């Protein structure tokens, strides 16, 4: 029994380091009518707040009105421009995941990046609902995790994330704003690891919200393009 427990602990420890699959970050749904090239921005503090991360760290400021020294941009403090090489200064991997998903979506599925730049697109996180269901945990404990090795989940997670996307022209005038709730329900398998399970749920909820917003952008494509000119 001791050997079984040691094996379980070792496998769980190793599985917690298992990276998310590449296709999680690369949704393949592309709008039929693409917008002209837009520069991507992410409101990092809003994602910090949604995920309860509090890991945004910069040099402290002497300004009492801005003690954390967040850089002011046309879209608020702590809003960062994104490229394909951007690495955000945060210990919270779900925020870096969000940046990569958003940049990929805009670059491949929302905009034609070969055109002349026409403005900016900003993503923010709003309210979040995140709940774990441990209905299988008693059976996992009773069987010392043996059934989990063969596919029985430890628990499930339901995540709902408010996704906000704003589009601005080159003069920073607001052209369009979309607000949708993304939904994800995931089972935690033996090989996921608890934190990777949370990352996956958050990423898929974000993608679901972005997919709904992409549909709205497609619907309003002509109006948005007209305002961007």
Image (spheres, helix red, strand yellow):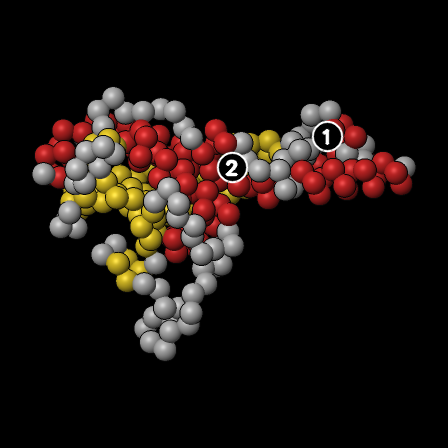
The answer to which quarter of the image holds residue 39 is: top left
Which of the image's four quarters has the C terminus? top left
Q: Quadrant of the N terminus?
A: top right
Q: Is residue 150 left or right of residue 27?
A: right
Q: Residue at x 15, y 45 (%)?
A: 169
The quadrant holding residue 140 is: top right
Q: Residue, x 15% and y 47% (percent of image)? A: 170
Give the class, few, some or many, for how many residues have Cα within 10 Å of label 2's Cα (few <14, many ≥20). many
Query: Could you say where residue 221 lies in the image, as x and y percent from the top left?
Result: 18, 29
- Between residues 68 and 161, which one lies in front from this camera angle? 68
- Residue at image point 23% right, 40% down: 38
How many marks overall? 2
How dense is the environment of label 1, judged by Cα within 10 Å: few (below 14), some, or many (20 and up)?
many
Is residue 132 shown to the viewer in this render?
A: no
Q: Which mark is residue 125?
A: none
Mark 2, residue position? 201
Q: Quadrant of residue 227?
A: top left
Please provide percent x and percent y for residue 144. 81, 35
Secondary-structure class at tag 1: helix
Relative to 93, 26 lies left or right: left
- Residue 121, position as x, y percentages in the image: 26, 43
Secondary structure at badge 2 equals helix
Instruction: Please give the residue where the numbered disc 1 appears in the rendered image.
Output: 148
Residue 110 percent across, percent down from the top left: 28, 31
Q: Nearer the viewer, residue 187 or 218?
A: 218
Q: Is residue 95 visible?
A: yes
Answer with mark 1 or mark 2, whichever residue precedes in sequence.
1
Q: Is residue 40 above or below residue 151?
A: below
């Amino acid at each position: 029994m001791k050997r079984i427990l040691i094996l379980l602990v070792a496998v769980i420890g190793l599985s917690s380091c298992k990276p998310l699959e590449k296709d999680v970050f690369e949704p393949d749904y592309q709008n039929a009518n693409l917008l002209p090239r837009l520069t991507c921005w992410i409101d990092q503090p809003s994602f910090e707040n949604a995920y309860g991360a509090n890991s945004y760290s910069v040099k402290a400021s002497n300004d009492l009105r801005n003690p954390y020294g967040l850089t002011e941009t046309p879209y608020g403090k702590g809003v960062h421009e994104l490229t394909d090489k951007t690495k955000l200064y945060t210990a919270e991997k779900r925020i870096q995941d969000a940046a990569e998903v958003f940049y990929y979506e805009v670059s491949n599925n929302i905009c034609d990046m070969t055109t002349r730049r026409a403005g900016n697109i900003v993503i923010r996180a709003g309210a979040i609902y995140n709940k774990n269901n441990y209905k299988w945990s008693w059976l996992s404990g009773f069987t010392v995790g043996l059934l989990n090795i063969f596919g029985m989940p430890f628990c499930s997670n339901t995540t709902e994330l408010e996704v906000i996307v704003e589009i601005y022209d080159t003069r920073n005038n607001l052209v369009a704003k979309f607000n949708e709730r993304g939904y994800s329900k995931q089972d935690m398998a033996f090989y996921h690891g608890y934190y990777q399970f949370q990352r996956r749920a958050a990423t898929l909820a974000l993608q679901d919200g972005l997919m709904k917003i992409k549909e709205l952008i497609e619907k309003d494509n002509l109006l948005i393009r007209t305002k961007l000119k």
